[in-house]
Image (tube, grey):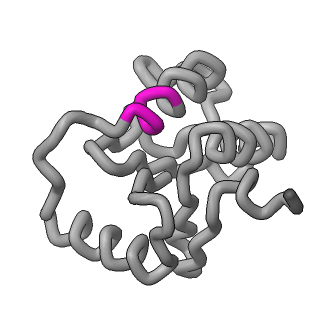
Amino acid sequence: MWALADGATPEDVRAAVQRCRQGQHIERHPDPRLVGFYRAITARYPDRPAGPGTPWAVAPLHTAADHIELNLDPGCADQVLLDIERLAGECRLMLFDAQDGSVYPPPAARLPG
């Protein structure tokens, strides 16, 4: 999940991912959109501690000022993905799929207006 400026492109997200992978993180307070997303998703699926049946392959979740990395267990329920997508839309976050490099705008942004 990435909280970038309005109008950010998939290329902007991929560049931010590269900076993160190189250990370059923004020094600022966490974006309020990420804080809201983190609180909501971990209220439903705790990561501290991650209990039995957790959807997280890696816990606790990696959090930074502008992103949260979610590593899902391959066998997690489809509902987890639906909850993540819904919350991402509500919080206006861009989704980056590390498996294939795809970037998705906030789900709500894809809905016809």
Give me the residue at 53% from left, 79% from top: 101
Magenta highlight on residue 5: no
The percent position of residue 80, horizontal first and vertical second, equals: 73, 39
Q: In the picture provided, is 17 more to the left or to the right than 55? A: left
Give me the residue at 54% from left, 51% from top: 93
The percent position of residue 87, horizontal first and vertical second, equals: 66, 37
What is the residue that sits farthest to the right in this orientation?
A: 112
What is the residue that sits farthest to the front in this orientation?
A: 113
Question: What secondary structure predominates along the stretch shown in magenta?
Answer: helix
Give me the residue at 64% from left, 56% from top: 106
In magenta, the rendered stretch is 32-36
Image quadrant assignment for residue 49 = top left
Please count the marks in the image.
0
Q: In the picture provided, is 112 more to the left or to the right than 100? A: right
Image quadrant assignment for residue 28 = top left
The percent position of residue 68, horizontal first and vertical second, equals: 41, 46
Image quadrant assignment for residue 56 = top right
Residue sitting nearer the eye, 64 or 89 = 89
The relative height of residue 84 versus residue 99 in the rendered view (above or below) is above
The relative height of residue 102 versus residue 105 in the rendered view (above or below) is below
* Quarter of the image where the C terminus is located: bottom right
Give me the residue at 50% from left, 68% from top: 7
